Image (spheres, rainbow, N blue to C red):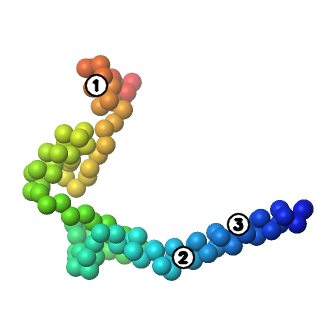
Amino acid sequence: MKKWALRTIYTILAILVVAGLVYHLGLRHWCMRWGTTNAEVHATLPGDDLFPVYSSEVTHAITIHASPEKVCAELVQAGIGVRGFAVTSPSLEDLFVGLTGEGFDVSG
């Protein structure tokens, strides 16, 4: 193999190793707690009892200065279904119904 090709491969490997170290040592902690306060990170949330033992924990949060009713109404207006704890995106059938006005049966 040519000398320049080996040098290029070693340079790329070195850049990847440095990028991995920078992420793991510097950015990973921030990325896993994005937008949260210490109180939110250590709080017991609904569903925590379902998985009492886990290997890693990620908590993301945003602050919205509006009532839950207003937020749900805006999400529904944007086409996102809000059901309990889950936020669902429109399915292919929802898009088809929106285009044609009639659904389809996939059960057979």
Task: Indicate the secondary structure of the residue bearing disc 2.
Answer: helix
Instruction: Write down the quadrant of residue 22 in the picture.
Output: bottom right
Q: Nearer the viewer, residue 65 or 106?
A: 65
In this rendering, does residue 28 appear at all?
yes
Amino acid type for the residue under numbered disc 1: Val
The residue where tag 2 is placed is 22
Q: Amino acid at mark 2?
A: Val
Residue underneath mark 1 = 97
Question: At 39% from the left edge and 74% from the top edge, which residue is drawn?
Answer: 30
1 and 2 marks in contact (CB < 8 Å): no
Location of residue 103 (image quadrant):
top left
Label 2: few (<14), some (14–19) or many (≥20) C-alpha neighbours in 10 Å:
few
Tag 3 residue:
12
Residue nearest the observer in this picture, 97 or 17: 17
Residue 35 image offset from top left, x and y in percent: 29, 69
- Tell me the CA gap for discs 1 and 2: 48 Å
